[in-house]
Amino acid sequence: MNRFTHLIDLDDLPISYIEKIVSLGADIAENTAKYSEYCKDKVLATLFYEPSTRTQMSFQTAMLRLGGTLIGFDNPETSSVAKGENLKDTTKVVSSYADIMVMRNPVEGSAKAAALSSDCPIINAGDGGHLHPTQTLTDLLTIKLEKGQLENLTIGVCGDLKYGRTTHSLCKTLSKFRGNKFVFISAPELSMPDYIKDIVNANGCEFREIFSLEDALPELDILYMTRIQRERFPVGFEAARFILTAENLTLMKPDAIILHPLPRVDEIEIAVDDDPRAKYFLQAKYGVYVRMALIIEILKNEYPTKLLSYECSDRVCANEKCVTAKEKYLPQSFSRKGDTFVCDYCEAVL
Ligand code: CP
C-alpha cells in the first residue's frame, strides 16, 4: 500500500468518497470564497506532457482559488524530459518540490507508474486513451447540479468510444449508481472496449450499442458527445463521425442535458450552443469547483492507494502503448480479473 491517496482511477476509491468530493464541489460552487485559504503554503505541480486547456487551467485556477501556488510545465520539450530524463526521475524530483502533482501523459498507465516513485499524491489528468478520472468528477458534479441526481438516468455516450478516455472513466463510475442505463452510439470501428462493457455489466447496468444518433436521442436524459481522437488513430485509420445538429434537438426530451468534455471539433453544431439543454461550457466551469474539492480531499491522504498487486509478475504486457513498454525499469504486474489477468498499469488483458 502506498502512503498517499493518489487519484489514478476512480475505481481505487470508495463510491462514498467520490460522492463526498462531488458534494464538496457543489458547496464550493456556492461558497467559493469560504475556501480561499485552504491551501495557503501548498504547492501544486502540473506536469502536462500532452496539450490541454481545461484540465490544466482548471487545476491551476483551483489551486490559486484555494490560496496555493503553482509550478510545472505544459510542454515537456521545455523541461529536462527533452534531454531524455525518464518518468521516474522527473516524478521523484518534482514531488520533492510540490505537495500534490497533476500529470497528463500520452502513455497509458503513466500516472500509476509516476505514483510508484512519487513523494506526494499524484492525480491522473489523462493517461493516453486509458482514463481521465477528473473529467468524470467534473461530469458527475455537472449531472448532480443540472439533473439533481446521479441515479436512474439513461445516458447516451456518442463519438469515439474506443480512444475517448473520458467515456471510459465516466461509464465505469456512473455504472456504480443504481438504475443507470447506457446507450453507446459510435461507428462500429470506434465502439466501447469490451473491458468497459464488462464492468458496466458486472455493476448491473443495462447497455446497448447503436449506430444512429437520431434513433437514440428520444430516450436520453443525458447526451454525452465526444470528439474523434484522431491523434490516437493508427496511420491510415478512418471512421464515420456523428454530428449533433440544431435540427436534432427536436428529438430530445425537454429536460435532457447535452454534455461534452471539450474540446469540440465539429461534432456539435455551433447553433446548438444557444439551446438551454447545452451545458458543456457550464461543465468546464464546474471543473474548477470539483478540482478544488479533490485537492482538499486528496491532501488529507485518508485512503492510501494500492498501486500494484503482483498477482502475476513473470509476464510482459503486450500493449505497445503501455508505460511498461517505454519505461523499461518498471516492474511488470497483473491482477486477476475473472478467468484472466489484466495489466495493473493499462488494464490490457494478458
Ligand atoms: N476535457 C479536457 O480534458 O480538455 P483539455 O484537453 O482541454 O484539458
Image: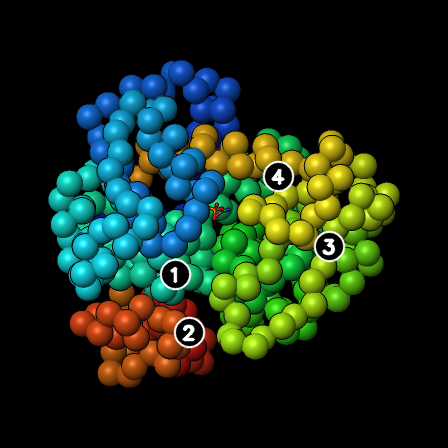
Q: CA distance from mark 1 to mark 2?
A: 16 Å
Disc 3 on helix, strand or loop? loop
Residue 41 appears left or right of 23: left
Q: Position of residue 203 (x, y in %)?
A: 55, 60
Q: Which mark is residue 243?
A: 3
Q: Nearer the viewer, residue 237 or 206?
A: 237
Where disc 1 sits, the SS reads loop
CA distance separating discs 4 and 1: 24 Å
Q: Write down the residue under mark 1.
A: 106
Q: Which residue is mark 2?
A: 348
Binning the other alpha carbons within 10 Å of mark 1 as few (below 14), some (14 to 19) or many (20 upward) gives some
Q: Residue at x 62, y 69 (%)?
A: 190
Quadrant of the image occupied by residue 114: bottom left
Q: In the image shown, does 116 or 233 lie closer to the viewer? A: 233
Residue type, label 4? Tyr
Mark toward the viewer: 3 or 2: 3
* Earlier sequence position, callout 4 versus callout 3: 3
Q: Please say if the residues under marks 1 and 2 sit with CB atoms less than 8 Å apart.
A: no
Which element carries disc 2, helix, strand or loop?
loop
Q: CA distance from mark 3 to mark 2?
A: 31 Å
In the rendered image, which quarter contains the C terminus? Answer: bottom left
